[in-house]
Image (spheres, rainbow, N blue to C red):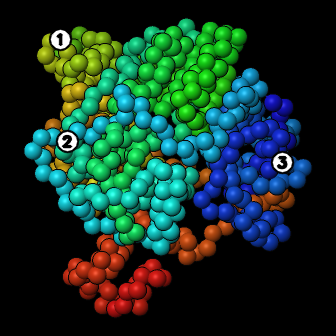
Amino acid sequence: MEPAKTLIDSGSSRNFIDKDYVREKNIPTTKLANKKSVIAIDGKEIENVISEKTELQIEVEGKTLRCDLYVMPLGDTEIILGKDWLDEAEPIIAWKDLTITYKDHTSGKAATDEPVIPKEFADFLDLFQEEGFRELPPHREEFDCAIDLIEGAELPKPAKTYPMTPAESEALEKYIEQELKDGKIRRSQSSMAAPCFYVNKADGGLRLVVDYRKLNAITKPYRFPMPVQTELLEQLKDAKIFSKMDIRWGFNNIRIREGDEWKTAFRTRWGTYETLVMPFGIINGPAYFQAYVNNIFKDLIGVNVVVYMDDILVFSRNREDHIKHVREVLKRLRANHLFLKPHKCHFFTTETSFIGIVISPEGISMEKEKVKAILEWKAPTTVKQVQAFLGLAGFYRRWVENFSTKAKPLTELTRKGIKFKWTDREEKAFQDIKEAITKEPVLIHPKPDKPYILETDASGVALGAVLSQKGDNGRLHPIAYLSQSFTPPQRNYNTYDKELLAIVHALEHWRLLLEGTKIPITVYTDHRNLQYWQEAKVWNRRHARWYLLLASFNYQIVYRPGKMSEKPDALSRRHDHGDIPVEPQIMIAPDKFIGFMADISSSFLDEVREAQKEDETIRVLWESVSNKEELPPSVEMSCQNFAGNCLLQADSGANF
C-alpha cells in the first residue's frame, strides 16, 4: 500500500481516517452502536458524521502502533493522528528539519505494508462480512454443546431480573428482536432461568451477559486438552512469515445439543428465552469450541497452523508457501460457515504476538517474559527496598549455590548503624542473585499434569504474582514471575478490586499455561473476602466482566495471611512502580496550532449516565428503587438529607 497522506495534529483528541480512502483501499470497518459528532476547527458541530471505525497498524518513521481510527470525510488528508496516537507513540519532533524520533529509540516492525485484506485473498472477502454470520449454524452432533447435569442436583429457581438503565433496556429489546429474527433464540417455558445484564465493551458498546453461575455449579465438566506451550514453541521455531486470524463470535458458532436448550434460559422484562447456540459464560464452552476447531484443522495443526480457541495462526518459511497455507485455512473456514473479524486479522507479518507469545525473526520471547519481573527490578535505593528484594530471593536460597556469600554485600546494608551506600560490589551481588533465581535449578519448566500454585498480591500502585509447581524434589519451584504497575484508573480501585485484579491479570497473563487445566489451580490471596466473590448475589459490571474472562479456568481461591505472601508482595511493591507518573507534555499549544482540532462530543448527561454505571452506591440505590424494595437505612438517611442533590435516572419513576 502506498504511504497515506497523514496529518499529526495535537489539537485532535482522536485518530481519524478518510471515508473515501477506506472504500478505495478495501479496509474493513466496524459499525458504531451510536453515531458520533465532531467539533471542527471553526467551533461548529458536525452532527452524527461518524458511524463506523477501523483498527489498523500504522507505521510512522519506523515505529508501528495499532490504532483505532474513526471514519469520516477528511478532504485532501487521508489520516489524522491525534492525541490518542501522540500519547502512545511519544514522538520527539525536531522542528528545524521536521524529523521524528522516539524516546525508546526502537522501531517496531509488526507488519509489512500489505493492505488489510491482501489481493491474494480477495476472493474470500465474504468471510470478512458480518451478514453471513446472521444465519443459524447447523447441528454438528459430535461437537454440539451438551449440558449434562450432575445426578441429583437441585435445579435453580428462576432468578429475578436485574435492573437496567433505559439505554440498556433499549439495547436488550433490539438484541432479542434480532436474535429471534436470526433464529438463535426462542421463547422458553423453562423451569429455571438465569438473569442477564450488560457490561461495557472496550469499544464503548454494550455486551450482554447471562449470569450462568448456578447452571455451571450443577453441570458436569467436559475437558478437552488445550494446546501445550512447549509444543507451540517447537512448532513455530523455524517459521519466517505469519498471518493471524480471529473467528467472529466464536462460541455462537456452536449449537446447543438438541434437548438441552431449556437449560440456557434467561429472563428479561419481556419474557423468558432460551438460546439455540452456545452462549458466553457457560462452563464447558471453551472446551467444546477448542474440540471443534481442532477437528477442522486436525491435519494442519503443527504443520503450518496453530489454533487456540478463536485465534488462528498460520506460519510458513516463505511467502509462496504462505499464500497456499492461508488459502487452505480460508477454504476450510468457508466450508464450515465460519467468519472472521477483519480488524483483528493480520497477513504476511514477520513479527506477531499470539496468545502472549511474541514471535519474530530473532526468536520467541516467552522465556524472557517469565522472568521479566525480576530482570527489570531496578537497583534499591533504600534499606527497605533491599529487604524487600532479599525477602523474595530468600524463598529460593536452598537452590542457589553459596546464596549467603552472594547476598552478603546486600545483607550488610540492612544492619543497624550501617550507612546505605550502593557501590559496584552491591550492584554485582544484586545482579548475581537476580540471575540465579531466574534460571534452573530455581526456575523449572511447567508440567501440565501437575497442579499449579498461583500466589498474587496487590499494593496501591502495582500487582505481583508468582506461578509455581512442585519439582521432582517435592518442593515448590517458581515457573514464572509477574510484576506490573496499575494504570491511573486502576489505582483508584478499592483494595478488594485491586487484589481481585491481580488474580484476573495473572490468570490472563499465563492463559496459555493455565486455561482448561484438569487439576484446579490453587490461587493464594491475602484478602479473605475474595474466597467468596464468585458466589456474590449481585455483581457490578466490572466483576461480571472479569468473571467472563475467567469462565474457562479451573481454579479455587484460598485465603492465606499476608505474612505468608511475601513473594508476590515483594513483586507488587517493587519500588520502581511507585514512581510519580510523568505529566503529558504539551507539544504545541492549541491556540498556536492551525489544524483539524477535531473532538468527539457527548452531552454532559450522557457522561453522567456512563459514570453512574460504575458507581457502586448509585447501583445499590437504583436496584432498590427499581425493585420497589425497602431502602437500606444508610441510603434512606442519605436521601432524606440530600434529596435535592440526589441524581436519578430521568424516567425512574422514583419519588422521595
Does residue 56 appear to the left or right of 574 in the view shown? right
How many marks can you see?
3
Q: Amino acid at mark 2?
A: Leu
Q: Looking at the picture, does residue 161 appear above or below residue 313? A: below
Compare marks 3 and 1 and give the one earlier in the sequence.
3
Give the percent coordinates (x, y) of residue 413.
28, 30
Q: Label 3: how many residues lie within 10 Å, few (<14), some (14-19) or many (20+)?
A: some
Give the percent coordinates (x, y) of residue 112.
72, 25
Compare marks 3 and 2 and give the one earlier in the sequence.
3
Q: Identify the residue under disc 1.
A: 472
- Taking depth in this image into account, of 325 and 4 the one nearest to the observer is 325
Q: Secondary structure at mark 2?
A: loop
Give the percent coordinates (x, y) of residue 334.
59, 29
Q: Looking at the picture, does residue 278 appear above or below residue 75? A: above
- Taking depth in this image into account, of 486 and 321 the one nearest to the observer is 321
Whether residue 656 is visible here, answered yes or no, is yes
Whether residue 356 is visible here, answered yes or no, is no
Q: Which mark is residue 20?
A: 3
Compare marks 1 and 2 and give the one earlier in the sequence.
2
Q: Residue at x 83, y 53 (%)?
A: 74
